[in-house]
Image (tube, rainbow, N blue to C red):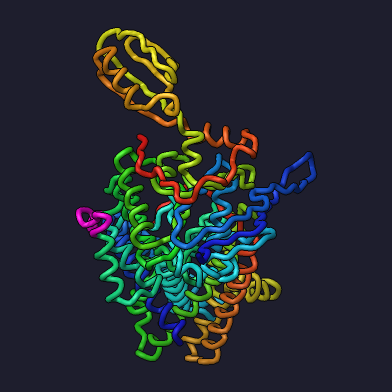
Amino acid sequence: MENAVSVSQLVKNFVLKKREGMRWTESEVKAVDGITLSIEKGQSVAFIGPNGAGKSTTIKMLTGILHPTSGEASVLGCVPWKERTRLAKRIGVVFGQRSQLWYHLPPRDTFELLSKIYEIKQDVFKSRRDMLIERFQLSEFLDTPVRKLSLGQRMRAEVACSLLHGPEVIFLDEPTIGLDVIARQELRDLISEWNRENGVTVFLTSHDAGDIQHVARRVIVINHGRVVLDDRVSRVRRQYLREKVLSVKYADTPESISLDGVKTLKESGHAFKFEVDTLAVPIEKVMSEIMRIGSVVDITIEDPPLEEVIAHIYSAPPTEFGDDAPDDEPDENESKSS
Amino acid sequence: MNWLTSYTNLASAYIKINFKSLLAYRGAFISQMVAMFINDFVWIAFWCLFFTRFPVVKGWGVNDVITLWAIAASGFGLAHMIMGNALALPGIIMRGELDSWLLYPRAVLPHLLLGKSSASSWGDFLFGIVVYAIFVKPDLPHFSLFMALICSVAVLFVGFSVFTGSLAFFMGSAESVSVQLRIAMITFSTYPSPIFQGFVKILLFTLLPAMFVSHLTVSALRNMSMLDALYSFGGALGVLLAGIIMFYVGLRRYESGNLMEMRG
């Protein structure tokens, strides 16, 4: 299958100036240190790593914002930093921390403006806009100024804007940042639906394990500017997200829990925090046991923080990440985390 | 030609959306516009008082100064009501906010400049036209030339703002330098040109090209001199070209940022 993105030995160094007494000294900081990867058309890939790992710098080079220090890259056959405007017509970009919506105006006005920026023919624009309004359920707030929208509504409109010109690849840099559980889930559903039904290649960065599990089929982990893991999400998930943390609040003091694979992390009054190894014991069994030993008032299930998973991946020996798993193995995107 | 049509369409789309965005807070927009109108008018009042005491300054009368103020204010206003981001350029570069503009399939500089409209500039623009029409009472040829010269001055101010704003690519924090140079440019553009002689005059035709506003435009209108008008246009295009070169050379050094951003 044809590649949407091909990167070879991509390097980006930034010059850091420091003042030492009366003198200025310059040193180089390696933000991206020889990344090599390729992404097939239609794939959905999570590109993750801790803060400062080089994710955003890589995205910026792949979208033509930054020139690399060395190395090669091709996105849809274009060299991003040399053919920026040509490429821009074929890609969509969503930065969770940057908005292309006009703050004081309704999303409808931004749609109109984007049609002029991308020079979309009026009939094509209208049909695509109406389709996005329907799919992203924008009609209820299409004429409301952006400043009055919830963050969830705003991000839905934001993603819709980035799809208006019909991009073949969409780069999403932390699109769910700051969203509540429901809004996050809605946005993930929309992105994965768009990937499945329209064949758009998705390149996602996020610190949220749920985004990665739900949207991506493949995960690339980078740290210190290098790729430290490139594998299917299902495989990584099985290996590292097998532990769940259950926070349970009981009405009274419950009986003690005695199940293999369940560890009590914290106990305070009637509140408990358990760590469950889902490989040792199915989560359904743990839930039944929790319900059996006392009257439950509240319960939350969480994945371990992604930072922890990344740190674990980075510190693990490379042999742990073989690529011998069968290709037809089903994804586990359907599992949801909150 | 296609390029020109495409960017004219883009400019009209931006003028429309910028105006809508300003009108979202109608009261604030109108008050900024009125405040700028009054501010400019105070200067005209000052010059009128001055000329009652000294009717001629090196060949310039009160009408010349009013013409100068009208052209400078309207030119500055036109520049920044259409290309308001010219004023914000150093901050945009410094904070790494060019990223958003580099993601669109458009030439980054014109697109970026069109992205904002300065509310007070609308006051400047209207002030110049109203004052010229009321005080100078021009005939149609003079008024037509006046409007053309406004465009020339607007191009010059945009070019100058781009040039000084692009210093941020090389200096990092260039906001205050850029503001100081812009203020100097406005100041020298609004004084009768004959008072500057010798080295200062050379400076005002080169590094701080205020003479293209204060000298050539007034002279063109006073004598209906197409040659002076052409020189004025030539100077404006030269400054714009210098600004464009400075921007694109600087863009190669651009390092983006990660700040939160919102438009409009």
Give the residue drawn at x 31%, y 68%: A112
Residue A337, placed above or below residue A77? above
**Which quadrant is the C terminus of chain B positioned in?**
bottom left
Residue B51 visible from this viewpoint: no
Q: In which quarter of the image is residue A251?
A: top left
Residue nearest the viewer, comparing A256 with B35: A256
Q: In this view, does B177 lie to the left or right of A17?
A: left
Residue drawn 64% across and 47% down?
A226
Indicate the position of residue A103 as horizontal and vertical percent values: 34, 54
Q: Position of residue A128 (x, y in %)?
A: 29, 68
Q: Does the magenta stretch include residue A329?
A: no
Counting from the top left corner in percent of width and height, residue A269 is at 34, 9
Q: In this view, does B189 lie to the left or right of A317?
A: left
From the viewer's perspective, is A127 left or right of B32? Answer: left
Q: Is residue A142 magenta?
A: yes
Residue B52, image quadrant: bottom left
Q: Which stretch is magenta? A: A134-144
Q: Which residue is rendered at x = 52% and y = 87% of the image?
A: B229
